[in-house]
Amino acid sequence: MTVLVPTMGALHKGHQALIKRARSMSKEVVVSIFVNPLQFENKDDLEKYPRSPERDIQLATLAGATEVWMPDYEEIYPGEITHLTAGPLGKKFEGQSRPEHFDGVVTVVNRLFEIVKPTAAVFGEKDFQQLAIIKAMKSKVEIIGVPTVREFDGLALSSRNVRLTQDGRVSANVIHRALAAAHLAPTVAIAQEIIDSTLSTEPAFKCDYAAIIDESSFELASDETKHKRGIIAGWIDGVRLIDNMTMGQGR
Ligand code: PAF
């Protein structure tokens, strides 16, 4: 069986965790590296997206990849593109700020699945909404989510972190601090208050959204919601950062 780890390159320990997980499931692990233009609504973000192919091959191989596949645009999108849509989930939160983003993600993931024909594919929980949307594609491919890998101060590993200034890098852990502080709050309202007040201590952080949602519908959670998750997105130094954490554990 083949397990696919789809990436856009600029690999780091977070991707390596995905690859290791894939390797624990199978002897055949394909890591794809393709910066998909369809999921970037902002040309500047696409152009600035970090690229490090040689290092990527090394890191992927060290983590257990048996094939690192770097298709070019024509291989993924020969001729006319069959655009898929991400459905209602794709319009919320991340999808509100980045309207075409999830349609681009499902379109490329579908192509990667068509070409590689994996039995399973592994994605990071850091992009929690993306993971939910890919699960909702209901493809035959088994979708595995892997917990977020963090820096020493809690910042979720992301290829975009390298674009933060030194000060920005220090401020960036406010996202994790907010989620961690709210994680055990007794009610949704208190958790939300803790998140909002923690984020407001860091003026460098420009919040896009900070909410507690039902993990499957992405509707705002109530105290009765069984599986709740805090989701936060925003910008520091113009770099978009997102993170999430389960809420209400231990109640
Ligand atoms: O999470 C990513 O890196 C991308 O969105 C993915 C899943 C590889 C699709 O381009």
Image (tube, rainbow, N blue to C red):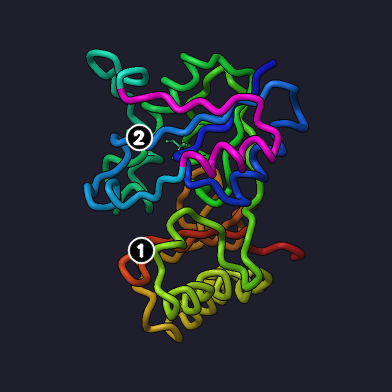
In front here: 77 or 177?
77
Q: Is residue 26 left or right of residue 98?
A: right
**Quadrant in which the C terminus appears:** bottom right
Mark 1 / mark 2, whichever is N-terminal: 2
Residue at the spot 50% in from the left edge and 78% down from the top edge: 170
Q: Residues within 10 Å of mark 2 (few under 14, many from 20)?
A: some
Rendered image quadrant of residue 38? top left
Q: Quadrant of residue 52?
A: top left
Please name whichever residue, 226 or 36, is drawn nearer the observer in this view of the structure: 36
Residue 194: quadrant of the picture: bottom right
Camera-side residue of 17 and 10:
10
Q: Residue at x 37, y 71 (%)?
A: 236
The range drawn in magenta is 53-73
Which residue position is annotated with label 2?
36
Q: Name the quadrant where ligand 1 sits.
A: top left
Whether the residue carrying mark 2 lies under 8 Å from ligand 1 is answered with yes
Residue name at image x 71 percent, y 39 percent: 20
Which residue position holds label 1?
239
Residue 123 drawn above or below residue 160 = above
